[in-house]
Image (cartoon, rainbow, N blue to C red):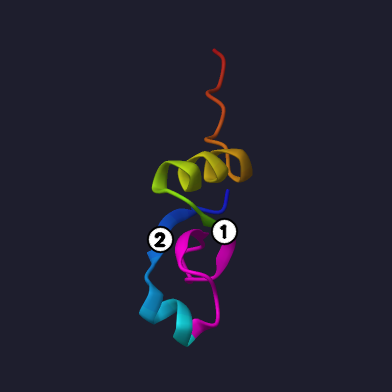
Amino acid sequence: MQNLSPRHVKTEESTRLGVTSGWYSTKVSGTFVSGPHDSESDCLRKIAEIDPPPAKKKR
């Protein structure tokens, strides 16, 4: 489990970072994992693919 979260990178910051503006999935450390995505919902979908929630234990 990587604990990924969505992050929006605006134009000013994207220029400084040398990336395209948009939504990125990031690790807690701030490292980009995927992106850019067109919307937050697209980014969240990708996060669910990369880092699915843990399966519930059967009793």
Q: Amino acid at mark 1?
A: Gly
Asked which quadrant contains residue 52, the reply is top right
Residue highlighted by disc 1: 35
- The residue nearer to you, when weighing 36 against 25, is 36
Whole-number angstrom distance, CA of label 2 to CA of label 1 = 10 Å
Question: Does residue 41 sit above or below 14 in this rendering?
Answer: above
Question: Does residue 32 sit above or below 19 in this rendering?
Answer: above
Residue ID at (40%, 79%): 13
x then y, percent, for residue 28: 46, 64
* Residue 23 among magenta residues: yes
Q: Which residues are magenta?
A: 17-35
Q: Amino acid at mark 2?
A: Arg
Residue ID at (51%, 39%): 45
Residue ID at (55%, 75%): 19
Residue highlighted by disc 2: 7
Q: Secondary structure at mark 2?
A: strand
Badge 2: residue crowd in 10 Å (few <14, some 14–19, many ≥20): some
* Residue 54 among magenta residues: no
